[in-house]
Amino acid sequence: MKRKRNLYEITNFPLDNESILLHETLFHNANGYLGVRYDFEEGYPEDYLTIRSQYLNGFYDHAPVLQPENLYGLARSKEIMPDVANTQTIRLFIEEEAFSMYSGQVLESRLTLDMDKGVTRRFVHWRSPRGREAAITITRMASFHQLSLFTIEYEITPLNFSGTAFIESGHDADVENYYDPEDPRNASDANRHIHPVHCEIREETSYITAMTSSSELTVCSCVQHRLPEGVLPEFWGDHISTLTRFNLDLVEGTATGFVKYAVFADSIRHDNCKTAAAEEMVKALSLPLSDLYYKQEVYLETYWQNCMVAIDGDDEADLALTYNLYQLNQSVTKDAYGNIAPKGLSGEGYEGQFFWDTEIYIQPFFTITNPSVSRHLIGYRYHTLDKARENARIMGHASGALFPWRTIAGGESSGFFPAGSAQYHINADIAYAVIAYYLATHDLDLILLEGAEILLETARIWLSTGTCQEETFNLLEVTGPDEYSCLVNNNYYTNVMARHHLEWVVKFHDLLKLNPAYEAMVERIGLGEGEIEAFREAALRMSLPYDEGLNINPQDDAFLKRIPWDLSQIPGDHFPLLLHYHPLHLYRRQICKQADTVLAHFLLEEAQPESVIRDSFHYYAPITTHDSSLSRSIFSIMAARLGMEEAALAYFGDLIKLDLMDLHHNTRDGIHTANMAGTYLAIVYGFGGLRIKESGLTLRPMRPSCWKGYRFNLKFQDSRLLVEVDDRQCRLTLVEGSAKSIRVYEEDYLLEGRLTIPLKTATGGPEDQKSNLPD
Amino acid sequence: MKRKRNLYEITNFPLDNESILLHETLFHNANGYLGVRYDFEEGYPEDYLTIRSQYLNGFYDHAPVLQPENLYGLARSKEIMPDVANTQTIRLFIEEEAFSMYSGQVLESRLTLDMDKGVTRRFVHWRSPRGREAAITITRMASFHQLSLFTIEYEITPLNFSGTAFIESGHDADVENYYDPEDPRNASDANRHIHPVHCEIREETSYITAMTSSSELTVCSCVQHRLPEGVLPEFWGDHISTLTRFNLDLVEGTATGFVKYAVFADSIRHDNCKTAAAEEMVKALSLPLSDLYYKQEVYLETYWQNCMVAIDGDDEADLALTYNLYQLNQSVTKDAYGNIAPKGLSGEGYEGQFFWDTEIYIQPFFTITNPSVSRHLIGYRYHTLDKARENARIMGHASGALFPWRTIAGGESSGFFPAGSAQYHINADIAYAVIAYYLATHDLDLILLEGAEILLETARIWLSTGTCQEETFNLLEVTGPDEYSCLVNNNYYTNVMARHHLEWVVKFHDLLKLNPAYEAMVERIGLGEGEIEAFREAALRMSLPYDEGLNINPQDDAFLKRIPWDLSQIPGDHFPLLLHYHPLHLYRRQICKQADTVLAHFLLEEAQPESVIRDSFHYYAPITTHDSSLSRSIFSIMAARLGMEEAALAYFGDLIKLDLMDLHHNTRDGIHTANMAGTYLAIVYGFGGLRIKESGLTLRPMRPSCWKGYRFNLKFQDSRLLVEVDDRQCRLTLVEGSAKSIRVYEEDYLLEGRLTIPLKTATGGPEDQKSNLPD
């Protein structure tokens, strides 16, 4: 099988402001620790709006949360991801002429994201206003080998002249977070989050140490240049910025250039940021750049092997899918201090906070391709468990831990609590991801170290969020994933997920109760005599709304009372509805922002008979707006699950290029990481029909007829598997590890080497093929 | 019967800061148009916090509403009552010594509110640091005869010396609204709402014209002094303030003094404020002060006659009741541009906005004592109907009018919509008050002119707030009066009030449909063919939650699912709960901030059988915290209604002196007008058992055994009635007007002159006497 080339490239890319903002996101460089938006080093015309920013995963400041009424316990401040020092700026003067894409003439240009090499590259054939022509190639890398490191390799080839280039390379902490001046929530002043405390040039290296406004965190950035032999730089600096200036001799036809190294060290991860930054710089410079490039490539080779997924017969979709998985790796933390934000490290949408997107959309991808990432993500929650305990007290729970709906360092950062803190399902989502990690890896050690405590503490919340009535346990006044219904009773998603959570607390308890470490933990958190029994009881009696007439699970106790609203009658420019209708108008109607009950049916399919899952899908499909980017992937999976190939493909088609095509018109604020993971899930869990359960791994593959086939690698316990589906069969290969029992189409197989199983046709009847297509 | 003396007086009143703030409220002067807090003219020590303010009814500015998330349609600005120019300041120097309650020695002092004369008076026997003694008497009046006018009569009697007094009397617009610097919602700057545009002294008169920051309203205040013959004042002024300075000869043993006149004119009521203010000043000065005092007394004589209510055998309660009714008259608008705020014109609590308190608590008092005030209050709603239409559109209703939950000029000013705009019952409350006005007056003209249009437009909202399901009409996602439950389905109060509203729309329609003015209105608002029928249907099918097991009306569909919470287990310092528990904690529990279903049972008793009303009372009494001051009066009424004398009295005792005793610890922010009206209702509707229904006037009088009796006047249609209850009987007298059929204890009588009916004993069993006492 020929290895595909993972390259995303735009030739003669547009230079209008909208495209610039979009490309800042699409071509950003990140490695899970630092993220740098893709800005032209030399800058833009003055009237251009740009978001020239760089971020660090888990690094945060506080910003005030405005509340119209100071009710008890509402968040008054939030954690946000601050913009850190700018190391992007490089101004080039060829003789007296400043290089700019907006002066002279761009004869040819190319923007490349090389996903095998892990670099972005800008190539420009430029003709200056006075007719000098040069080829300029700028290569940027956020190193996966050394997470603190961002490099810019700058190369100039004069084409029709020889002469001198003057370079001015900047490093400054004069940065503020992006804000929309039309948006009264943000005051301009409040957006300057880092303040330089020390700025110096020492041994040709520029250091800026800055502190956040309120969280009192420190970050040191450090910049140095590797110049051609004999070139002597000059330095300039003030309290907030430095400049490195030097000349390069240009010889017609010969490439000349330099490399700019920037490293970042923060006080979350280091005791002394400046010392750490200095050490990181020494480390970066200890290898030639080519070695760093090589390590980057080696790293990515492993990555692509682990998460290989390919569509045969749709190259565009295949490339988009690759792009998405590349971004997931750029975005996800490589330690337990960070996490993965809805926009990764590519922009400031949602202020860099972490949500349930991590556990329900993104972690499943890593769990079966790169489980060590999932360990970091679980570790992150474990490290913020104390904050979750504090949060639970604020919310009135005498014991247990309630994870915040939005957060960076563990503090609740959601302002409007009915659509924020009320989303208690976050506790069950985290539990689900821990359980899923265990099922895929059988790593009981992590459960013992971190998982069990997380599950126990979060489970306690359910018992004080609900009460038993007429033998059923009700969870009250919570908000499910669908934010077009708020503060409901017995949200099906929340309840069934809480039941799963409670059941597993009991299972793990039974599994671990004789283990001394577990016993010590249980004693530390003061687990009472009857608590395990109470968990078992609550799970047993958990209310799961069901309507006999419709044979569906209503989204909550009152969902079917709401006013029907024919989506097809709403003008197209009224979507997303939240921007055009008062929340109360939405809350009163049978309308969903996103998959809610349908998502629950995906995650916990055993909870309902097939017919209820099917009828529910058909009920919710026409009333779901997909105003959230977390929705279509789930509908695609469930359409595939129900044999509706055409619908599954239509949903998939809408989501695969969400960012590349800027379908939501907000990619400038950052990529949509959950949707990106959703595209993977749509293939592996949707068309592939993968499920990992207590009973083991199961597959129900189907092939969309417009594809020749598809294939993917996955990790399961100690083994690596290759799944290949073509027009007639599904081939399973045990690439490494021990033999595994696998269930395909409800039949059990033992996978020792290779298995070939003929494809079954869709289980859905012909009517399913036609109905419920998304718009 | 000897006429009682309506005097509230404190001798040797305390001078600590807390008392000063309390007395600023308790002794404020108001007349329904202007309100002036009671401040010492000469000022306070520098470190004292005071709220030295004056307000105009209906005059407003805008202030920003902070929202944590900019959801569609949320209020971004609110209407607030700005502080207007200060005309209180008078500094007195006796020779070189400045008079102050905080220097020298106060040998005797008295603070008096004379509720017959309509003035406040401060008497001080002062000894200066150097031993000069003087008696100082300061009398203040907000004139009921001339609403623009506030006077200060200042009299000095030297007791042990003769000499010269120097007076400096101020007028300034250097004012800002009170804010709590601890409260991050308010920025200091935003509290300066009026900005002087013109300040001048002309013909010994000081004029300051000022404009509001954002609403662009203008107010002119004008100050002049009447001085003893021969005294020549000097003037000083800048752009924001003026001073009038003069000397007075002091002769031992002889009183000498002056009068300060201040008038206000605003651009809501006048085309040219300055001209209007000048005219008002001329008018004020055209009569001697004694004539103004006389007119004030005559006005109040009529007022007290109309609303006479007296408790025989409890002088303290009687005085407190008189105080309350006096404040209602001070607070309530005398035209349709204003209304009555929860704090009247006495303070800035709730920012001077108007709520449902008007229609459900206060208007009933005026409707049966001074119906012209109710006409103004209905007129106010009618004038803001267009704003209510706009508000309905914002909330997503294609037709109809939704009155805002909090407002001054008609714009929605509530920030947290789940406990604000979601209180749709405001529409039914306004309708209820219009209907009640009609039942008490038979004034069909007002219905034709204003009432019918209000009722029709507001009724339309119900049809788009709910939907029919299984033959019952459900009202969805509203908040009832009890703000400890938000966004519920089928709140009993809202639904039964909406049903009443809808039924009366149909009744009025049947009554008026042939009237050309009504026809024209109906055409103007585009009343559709089937709308009246739809109203009838919705009323017929209106869902009214009922639980068979408990034989009660649950507060809403899900109320009984909530977690029980034993109020007696909550520490006393955790009340009001809203200051100590997260809203979600409260929403999940069976706990009420205030009367909700019990209030509905008071207002619409025919809707339920007696046993349901009784059982509901017993269900809600132990779970109601009365954290709102609107609650105890209703529980008192219903306890009386159910024959529970002891409970009724206990509730009554808690509310009658709420302000005089500062029981809620917030009277410094203003009086509690709804509670004040509630004290009246508790006697007339509670112990007196008054109801005015379509079938006429009914009474079910009872006498609390600790009182000798009680009596009250009331207006009913064209008649005035006197009701007197003593230990054995109830005596009814037709004071004026035509004979009336009256139902007492379910028997019909014709009242032509006087009727004496023996008292019935309590209908409640002995167990009712014991249980459900408030704490």
Image: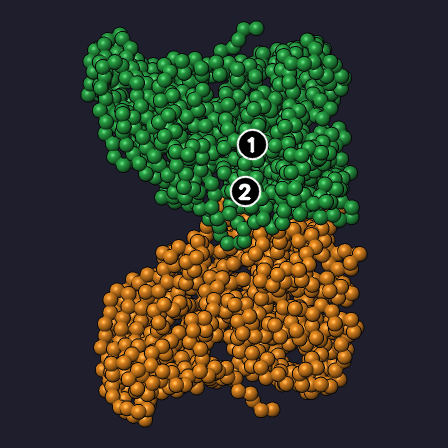
Chain colours: A orange, B green
Mark 2 Cα shell of 10 Å, populated few (<14), some (14-19), many (≥20): many
Are the residues tagged 1 and 2 within 8 Å (C-beta)? no
Chain letter, disc 2 residue: B
- In terms of sequence position, does the residue under pointer 1 or pointer 2 come before the other? 1
Task: Identify which residue, A253 or B733, lies in the foreground.
Answer: B733
Above/below status of B40 relative to B533: above
Under circle 1, the secondary element is helix
* Kind of residue at badge 2: Lys
Task: Identify which residue, B363 or A704, lies in the foreground.
Answer: B363
Q: Which quadrant is home to the N terminus of chain A?
A: bottom right
Residue A704 position within the rendered picture, expressed as x and y whole percent measured from the top left: 69, 80
Q: Residue shown at 25%/86% (left/top)?
A: A164
Residue B502 position within the rendered picture, expressed as x and y whole percent measured from the top left: 70, 38
Res B379 label: 1
The reply to whether label 1 and label 2 mark residues of one chain is yes
Whether residue A126 can be seen here: yes
**B229 sits to left or right of A302:** left
Res B387 label: 2
Q: Residue shown at 45%/28% (left/top)?
A: B33
Q: Quadrant of residue A511?
A: bottom right
Mark 1 Cα shell of 10 Å, populated few (<14), some (14-19), many (≥20): many
Above/below status of B581 relative to A156: above
Q: Quadrant of residue B428?
A: top right
Whether residue A333 can be seen here: no
**A274 sits to left or right of B608:** left
Q: State the CA–CA distance, disc 1 to disc 2.
A: 14 Å
Residue B116 position within the rendered picture, expressed as x and y whole percent measured from the top left: 47, 14
